[in-house]
Each structure stands twice: as C-alpha cells, then as structure tokens.
Image (cartoon, helix red, strand yellow):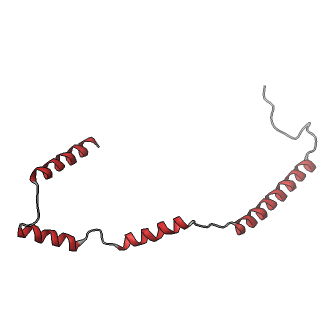
Amino acid sequence: MTNPISNINRPATDSLTSNASKSRDKTSTDTSNSSAAARSEDTVSLSAESNQVQQLQQQLESLPEIDSQKVESIKQEIAKGNYPLDAERIAENLIKLEKALLET
C-alpha cells in the first residue's frame, strides 16, 4: 500500500515553516557575522626558532651545491700525485653503496 504525498488531510504548516525558515536565516546571518569578526581577529606569530630556521634556509639556498674550489684543488692534488687514494677502501665503500641500493 502506498501513501502519496499531498496536502489532503494535513494540518496547515505554513506558519510553522515560515517561522522555521526565518529562524534559520537569522542563525546563518549571525554565524556569518561572528565568523567575519573572528577572521579579523585571527593572528599568527612565529617563534624565534622558526625565524632562525627560515634564515638558515635562505642562507643554504644561496650557497652553491658544489664547492668548485675544493673540487679543483683535489683534482690538482690527484694530478700531482699528492692526494692519498686507498683503492681498497674505495672498493669497500662502493660495495657498501651497491648493497644499500639493492636493499631499497
């Protein structure tokens, strides 16, 4: 059995509906006014540590990724034969690197 929706045999609810919608409109207006007031009062302050971190980040960004002077001096020392190279140690470190890459 179905019961179709219609206004027959229903009490008049126009006054209730209009009062409810007026109340909702007033509430939404009050809410938007209070949220606008809250937004104007919101503030953010950073700690001293945060400011230091930002300054350090800026300093790091201004530094070159590679110290070309150091690279050049090492190249010259290797060419002259004055830079000690331990072939066994280099090989061990390469093996460690390869193993680490395989594990990931």
Residue 95: percent from the left, percent from the top? Answer: 17, 46
Question: Relative to residue 63, is residue 73 drawn left or right?
Answer: left
Residue drawn 11% across and 69% down?
A: 77
Q: Is residue 15 above or below residue 74?
A: above
Q: Is residue 41 above or below residue 100?
A: below
Q: Is residue 51 above or below residue 97?
A: below
Number of marks drawn: 0
Q: Residue furthest top?
A: 1
Residue drawn 21% across and 74% down?
A: 69
Residue 21: percent from the left, percent from the top? Answer: 85, 53
Image quadrant where one finds the N terminus = top right
Observer-nearest of 13 and 77: 77
Residue 70: percent from the left, percent from the top? Answer: 21, 71
Residue drawn 74% across and 62% down?
A: 35
Observer-nearest of 6 and 44: 44
Image quadrant where one finds the C terminus = top left
Question: Relative to residue 57, is residue 26 drawn left or right?
Answer: right
Residue drawn 29% across and 68% down?
A: 65
Observer-nearest of 83 and 72: 83
Residue 102: percent from the left, percent from the top? Answer: 23, 42
Observer-nearest of 28 and 19: 28
On the image, which quarter does residue 82 sit in?
A: bottom left
